[in-house]
Amino acid sequence: EVQLVESGGALVQPGGSLRLSCVTSGFNIGGSWMSWVRQAPGKGLEWVANIKEDGSVKYYADSVKGRFTISRDNAKNSLYMEINSLRAEDTAVYYCAGTSIPWGECVFWGQGTLVSVSS
Amino acid sequence: QTVVTQEPSLAVSPGGTVTLTCASGTGAVTSDFYSNWFQQRPGQAPRALIYSTSNKHSWTPARFSGSLLGGKAALTLSGVQPEDEAEYYCLLWFGGAQSWVFGGGTKLTVL
């Protein structure tokens, strides 16, 4: 059974930093592009970033470039997202997702972790 | 402009057919946008339905189909079931911006 489990969400003050983690099982993460998608309360989905199987290529949404850094450790079956200079508009559930299908983005999903940015 | 537009809401009767569309702010959607479609029920994570315009996943019900229609990506549900009531999102690849972009979502109501 494919499982993706996110962690690291928290209540953080504006300007703070956070590291999200996603541990996977049941599929070959080493053969999969991995992504982060977020969803603000009551809003739609926003694609945030993805990373190639070997970590050599990373793409980011314009809204997070320069503040978010995606990374992975295939040996630990894990995906990460370092978030800096947090803003109120970063408040959202952050989902981890993965795919091994060419151009099939975000096939497998976790249940998400909540990041709240507030003073 | 990397804006993706979907109908905010649609309604359909059980057993009916409905088509949801997905438009790009840069012009016509083609196969180079590799459109993906997702279903999200309240309180749940999204579920992938369609990839690369028209390809179904192994778990995608046969009544769902993807296509290109009039310069847009389209998701058609034929023989709608009550459990199809959900929010549906399209996702397009913008090669120039090297970024995927979600549409705003369509809330489908089964009356």
Image (spheres, rainbow, N blue to C red):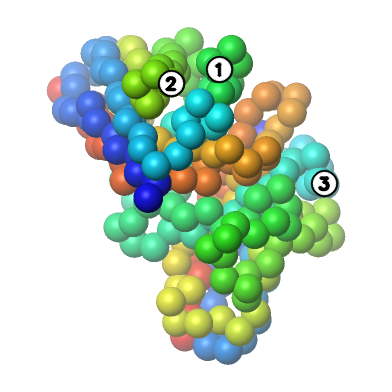
Give the letter of the chain under mark 2.
A
* Residue nearest the viewer, comparing A9 with B50: B50
Q: Amino acid at mark 2?
A: Asn
Residue highlighted by disc 1: A54
Determine crowd level at label 2: few under 14, some 14-19, many 20+ residues with C-alpha closer than 10 A: some
**Percent from the top left, x then y, of residue B44?**
34, 56
Q: Amino acid at mark 1?
A: Asp
Determine crowd level at label 3: few under 14, some 14-19, many 20+ residues with C-alpha closer than 10 A: some
The numbered mark, 2 or 1, whose residue comes first in the sequence reads 1
Q: Residue at x 29, y 38 (%)?
A: A5
- Cα–Cα gap, marks 3 and 2: 34 Å
- Cα–Cα gap, marks 2 and 1: 8 Å
Q: Are marks 3 and 1 on the same chain?
A: no
Give the letter of the chain under mark 1.
A
Element assignment for label 3: loop
Mark 3 vs mark 2: give the one in front. 2
Q: Residue at x 23, y 26 (%)?
A: A8
